[in-house]
Amino acid sequence: MKVAVLGLGNVLMGDDALGPHVIAHLSAGYDFPAGVIIEDLGTPGLDLHPHLAGHEVVILVDVVKSEGEPGALRLYNKDEVLRHAPGPRVSPHDPGVKEALLGLQFAGDDPHEVLLVGVIPDVVCNLEVGLSPAVQAAIPVAEAAVLAELDRLGCPATPRQPPQPADIWWELPASAG
């Protein structure tokens, strides 16, 4: 089975860095079976299509606009993601998940299953590095949701012994080089 676990987000925009954080933690703490790729896509904009194509299952990790408290987990399947027509793109870095899935569906190359592991952000509009406390606390919850989905798919991750430290390179102090 070809499965892609993809983190989306801008590491310079506060809570928008959730996807890259979760991918860094998963990569540091687990080994994944053949056929499962784990990748931080950053802010792909209109270039999301090739990252989704050719996979049977795609698990996306990102912040989501939703009712609720910052840090709350939201899970959306493919039908829920596509339920409403795509809205206007408000930024060149808007990942365009709906547009990419619809385009791939039209081409006959869309993933059979999609799970969006979303967390409600607190702050995403400020140019700042670092997650809010609520979203920082949601990293293990989002990570657990990804691992549970991989288990359900029959391609479980294996914990590393010992786990590696997560490479959160964008939060290194300036003196660390």
Image (cartoon, rainbow, N blue to C red):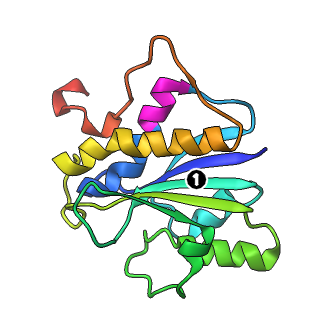
Q: Against 117, is 140 above or below?
A: above
Locate residue 64, reporting x and y percent: 37, 66
Query: Predominant secondary structure in magenta?
Result: helix
Count of numbered circles in the view: 1
Q: In this view, does 56 lie to the left or right of 78?
A: right
Q: Is residue 26 magenta?
A: yes
Q: Can residue 108 be seen in this view?
A: yes
Q: Residue at x 54, y 88 (%)?
A: 85
Snapshot quadrant of residue 98: bottom right
Locate residue 90, reporting x and y percent: 37, 81
Instruction: Report the span colored magenta.
Output: 24-30
Q: Is residue 79 left or right of residue 44?
A: right
Q: Against 117, is 34 above or below?
A: above
Q: Against 21, is 44 above or below?
A: below
Label 1 sits on residue? 59
Q: Can residue 132 be seen in this view?
A: no
In the rendered image, the quadrant that contains the N terminus is top right
Q: Residue at x 54, y 73 (%)?
A: 81
Neighbor class of circle 1 (other Cα within 10 Å; few <14, some 14-19, many 20+) is many
Locate residue 61, reporting x and y percent: 47, 53
Q: Residue at x 38, y 30 (%)?
A: 167
In the rendered image, the quadrant that contains the C terminus is top left
Identify which residue, 116 or 37, lies in the foreground.
116
Residue with the most extreme top position: 162
Residue with the most extreme right position: 108
Locate residue 42, reporting x and y percent: 45, 53
Q: What element carries label 1?
A: strand
Type of residue at label 1?
Answer: Ile
Q: Is residue 74 magenta?
A: no
Q: Which residue is drawn at 48% across and 34% down?
A: 26
